Image (cartoon, coloured by chain):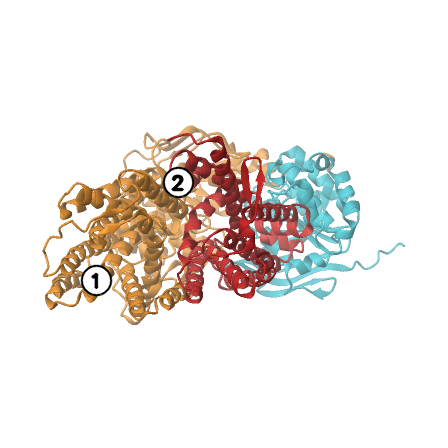
Amino acid sequence: MKQAAEPSRLLSVESINVSYGDAPALWDLSLHVNEGELVSVVGPNGAGKTTLINTIMRLLPVRSGRITLRGEDVTRMSATQMCNRDVSIVPEGRLLFGQMTVEENLDIGCYRSLARPRRSETMERVYALFPILKERRWQLAGTLSGGQQQMVAFGRALMAHPRLLLIDEPSLGLAPSIVELVFEAIGQIHRSGVSILLIEQNAARAMDAASRAYVLEGGRIVTEGDPQQLMKQPAIRAAYLGEAEHPV
Amino acid sequence: MQMPSLELLGQSLLSGLFIGGLYGLLGLGLSLSWGMLRQINLAHFALAFLGAYLTYQLSEHFKLDPFLTMLIIVPGFFLIGMAMHWMFAKFKVTPFNSLLVTFGLAVIIESLIQWIWSADYRKLESPYNDIKFQVGKLFLPLPELMTLLIAIALSIATWALLRYTHLGKAMRAMSENPKMASAFGINEPMLALLLSGAASAFAGVAGACLALSFTLAPSQIYAWVGVVFSAVMIGGLGNPLGPLVAGIVIGLSEAATMAVTAPAWAPLVSFSLLIAVLLLRPGKV
Amino acid sequence: MDRRVIAAFVVLVPLLAAVPLLKLPAFYETFLYLVLHWIVLATSWNILSGYSGYFSFGHGAFFGVGIYTTAVLSGKLDWPFLSTLPVAALVAAVFGVGLGAIVFRLPRLRGELFGLLTLAITFVIGTIILNTPIDGGPGVYLSAVPVPAIGPTPSGSFYLIILALAALVLWVAYWIYTARLGSGLFAIHDDEDVAEVQGVPTYRYKLIAFGISCAFAGMAGGIHSVFVSYVTVGEVFNIVVPLNVVLMSVLGGSRHWFGPAVGATVITALLYAFTAGDFAVAGRAAIGFILIAVILFMPQGILGQLLRYWRKRAAPKPLPQPLPPAPIPRTGQSGELILSVEGVTKQFTGVRALSDVTLQVHRGEILGLVGPNGSGKSTMVNVITGLYKPEAGRVVFNGTDLVPLPSFQAAHAGIARTYQIPRPFASLTVLENATLAGMFGGRQLSRSQAERQAMHWLEFVGLAERAGALPTELNLHQRKFLELARALASAPQLVLLDEVLAGLTPSEINSAITLVREIRNRGSTVVFIEHNMRAVLELCERLIVLNYGQIIASGDPRKVIADPEVISAYLGTPHETGR
């Protein structure tokens, strides 16, 4: 097939306005993720990236606008309903259940009825992806290092058998060598057929991995397009570092 | 201070063990609702006494076997517990305010008890009271033994449920981070209702055991508050085995103190332990 | 102090003192005694617990200590009754202050845990008294103690004694309410950490309030022991007294000096009416319902609700005249060091937030402190302002190392800060928030002076019309500017602005930038922590970049952001095999 089939819209966010408390956080924001894509959203701290991810997962209410998943309007749904529609999240700061073991955290991942029957099969795949977790399966998640916790967070999300994976700042607080591992895992997960929306402060890495990117600043999308092109533009340095004195 | 005979000491420690079991049974529900739902339920004690009085009433007047009365009490109290949690959730009661609201509930329940059964002492006379087992020179009265066994059974069952079943893991996840738990399909409101119901059902069971061994009076309700809170805190909030272990430790210490000095020194033990735990335990309880 | 309140005291107390002349039956005099008795207990409890939020469940312990002090002195050692009362107060106060000295040092013992601890103390003291010759078991008989014939009858005399105590307690509660101590306690109630950083000596204030509260409980106990004439440990050291005072204060309104008195009167009257009418049980049940209803629907209590209602109807109070502040004392030359952070390391479990950081701030400059998320900027601010103590290093401000000093000294020395997510005192108005900063900050102003200063700064940030509003009625922008006004109202020499611009629109950002410049021009040195690089470049004369708890660059802002290490810290390093 020479011509690629029209990519089907997996996730569509249309002109949403979101407030965090009473402070407006996202303005008139639109983006989409097609089936099979890895899309990155980058931007400086305070731009609203975590608000965006939490809103898509329906952990935050939407003031106005629409979110659709495979054509279905999910704007008024709950996080549990999103989970049951094959959406899973790797939240910022990992947010593991620290008093539970690694394996128990993975168990929670497959709590939903669709995922539970395939528990052992999925768990084997997670352990294959992150061998160190198999070694430490009985360890309390709260006692793991940052990098290991990040792996558990990925594993937990994968146990839910998602078709869309939302990843929020996976490199936060991790040493560069661990960031390497994390992005490798992201690549593998993507290649196994999971669509990914990746939020990252580390723009270079995020752009590397993605087929399409958005730049978020001050709660708005300021630019979007091909990641490599975006990295060359002064707009991205301006977003992070103010006016650029000279181009890259 | 005089050293008692070995038999006396042994019997003393045994009764300390038994009462420790009751502390544990009373503390189990309290620990669950405080540790996992962040509700400090002062009404727990009043509920236990309500259960005790109901056991007394059903036994004395309807000639029901005291242990069978639990079949009626458990479901009833389960519903009461669910109703309480529903109210807390609806009014968004903070952990601190739950202390005050449940105090109000406790007062209401206590008044109800006094209205129905008056302030007079009531004692459940059952054939079980006279049965004693003998092991060597020590006597094990049946009601107290049953209480201990029930306490152990319920604590272990709860622990196992929380540890090994999907439902239990979901409850633990929910108590740590309800939002994240919901992102993985866990129905937090439903589970919270179940937990709250179970905690109150445990109160009812504890009450039934109380009725078997103790004379009941409404004024006695608050006598248990201090020592059971001690057991709950020392055992660690939310840990199902905690109140039992801590309760037994407290019971044994009290018994030893009583045997060696005067009975009136006993309360010092649990409260001093509680103070020590509060002051010395690093980090959050 | 309100003249109307003073007048009420001056008029009502003598009037009430004349009641025994009416020769009412003992039934009524006893009722009046009980009402006043509970007014004393509830009001004294409220001084610590209602004002500061440290709910003590141990008021019964100090009441009991007072009871037994008098029981022993009068009942067993034949001291004259009245002379035992000051001793009862003193002994109870000593116990309270002793307990507080230990417990208030432990920040995790707040809220429910403080309540439980104080409850446990009750039973410990009770058990000790029960098992020692103080009581020993049988209780203490005090019927033989002669009651001074102040009134026409014994019950009349008791009434007068407790009336005197009640008047005293209410007066003291009122005085504290209007004094610095009260303002500090209310600030502690809303946010103890912020109060400390604003300069409130939290430890000292809590101890003082606790001591006063226990002293009055002790004295009430001393009086009560002879009133009931037979005391036992079981009747005294239990959960009933603390729960009653909590109930009465919450019902009446625990944020007001008179609230507990209202609650005490209502509850005592209810109980008395029901007991008299043989409906004691129904009465208690009613109280349970009332408590639940109040917590759920009327958390400010009866008086609190009434006051809110009256305030809405009343004409608004005139605002104080703004007063421009005296110039910030230039204790040194422009350009010299105002703050020197030397080798500071701050460790949390598993994370080293700051690693051997050394930086300097020069008087009169606007210094920018930037870095990616998690680089340690907020930790740095918390260390400088005293909220965290570093594991190593010094924080030298105007020549004095602040690290060994109690946290509130940073504010007294002249340091102020804003919070990234605004943390105003939720129950205080905008004006009161700003006033507090002036009262407890470097200048230690009187309330009226602080109010005028506060008005000046509220005008400066544009919040003057909202001076009477509560923080929940403001939007984010206004709350951020309240943070700013509050920081400035303490006339700081050094002000740390922690992400003031987050969440603001571009035009709001522009006005904020103008404000910050103005702040510096008026004599404060500014450390500006921000993510918004455009603003940083516009404002800052010097820039320091943190990453992973260490300084990776410092100097001229434009040079710094072009530094490759800084760029990669922010944007990340591309993949090794990148294109």
Q: How many marks?
A: 2
Q: Let me know if marks 1 and 2 both belong to one chain.
A: no
Q: Tag 2: residue type?
A: Pro
Image quadrant occupied by the C terminus of chain C: top right
What hue represents chain B? Answer: red
Q: Which chain is cyan?
A: A
In the rendered image of this protein, which colour is used for chain C?
orange
Q: Circle 2 sits in a helix, a strand or a loop, which is it?
A: helix
From the viewer's perspective, tell me whether residue A11 is left or right of residue C366. Answer: right
In the image, what residue type sits under mark 1? Thr
Q: Where, by quadrant of the figure, is residue C68 drawn?
A: top left
Residue B203 rendering spot, x and y as whole percentages: 53, 55
Q: How crowded is the residue under tag 2: few (<14 C-alpha within 10 Å), some, or many (20+)?
A: some
> Which is nearer the eye, C271 or A129?
C271
Position of residue A158 measured from the top left corner of the image (x, y, whole percent)? 73, 48
For the residue carrying disc 1, how many other residues have a C-alpha within 10 Å: few (<14), some (14-19), or many (20+)?
some
Residue tagged 1: C30
Q: Is residue A106 left or right of residue C427?
A: right
- In the picture, the disc for residue B263 is 2
Q: Residue at x 71, y 58 (%)?
A: A84
